[in-house]
Each structure stands twice: as C-alpha cells, then as structure tokens.
Image: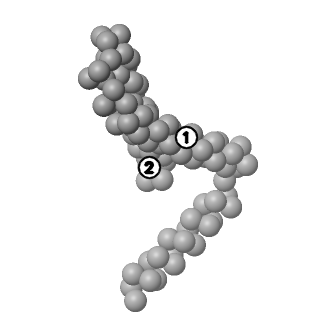
C-alpha cells in the first residue's frame, strides 16, 4: 500500500515537473533522449557487425585486422558517449 502511494506521488511530481518545464528545455530533453537511443542503436549495430565479421578476420590479411581494431575502438568510444549521456541525464533527475 505504501509503495503504491509513493508511486502515485512520484508520478504526480513528474507530471508537475514536466508541466513546469520551459518549452526549450523540454525540446532539449527530447533531443537528448533521441541521441541516447541513436547511440545505443549504433553501439548494438557495431557490436553485431563485430561478432558477425570476426570469423572473417582469421582469413583476411593484416589490413583488415586493423579495420577490426578500429571498429572495436569505435565501439568503445560509443559506449563511453552512451554512459556519459545516461549519467548526465540521471544527474539532472536527481539534483
């Protein structure tokens, strides 16, 4: 019962906060959500390609192994950007 009451209070607080937001701030938060989803999708896509193409790396010449090294590094950078965006938005939620 207490959990339900707290959940309702949280939902009411979120509604009040959303209504009180400046339209520019609301648009900015929407863009940030889309950016997080885009980076997450790109991360999943590059991970899929890494796994799918990893079998080819044994049979291909050295130049292609440099390509895979770059792909892995790109994936790490995407993961760091994703973590930054999510943590920054969590910081905005809990000031």
Q: Quadrant of residue 79?
A: top left
SS under mark 1: helix
85 or 2: nearer the viewer: 85
The residue carrying mark 2 is 90
Left or right of residue 34: residue 84: left
Q: Can you name the residue that lies furthest to the left here?
A: 58
**Residue 84 placement (x, y as % from top left):** 42, 36
- At x 69%, y 45%, the residue is 27
Relative height, residue 61 to residue 9 (above, below): above
| Mark identifier at residue 38 | 1
5 or 57: nearer the viewer: 57
The answer for how far apart the CA atoms under marks 1 and 2 are is 18 Å
Front position among marks 1 and 2:
1
- At x 29%, y 21%, the residue is 59
| Mark identifier at residue 24 | none
- At x 31%, y 12%, the residue is 61
SS under mark 2: helix
């Amino acid at each position: 019962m207490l959990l339900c009451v707290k959940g309702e209070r949280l939902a009411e607080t979120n509604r009040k906060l959303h209504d009180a937001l400046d339209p520019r701030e609301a648009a900015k938060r929407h863009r940030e959500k889309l950016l997080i989803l885009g980076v997450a999708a790109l991360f999943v896509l590059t991970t899929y390609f890494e796994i799918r193409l990893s079998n080819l790396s044994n049979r291909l010449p050295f130049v292609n192994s440099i390509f895979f090294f770059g792909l892995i590094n790109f994936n790490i950078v995407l993961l760091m950007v994703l973590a930054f965006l999510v943590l920054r938005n969590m910081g905005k939620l809990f000031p």
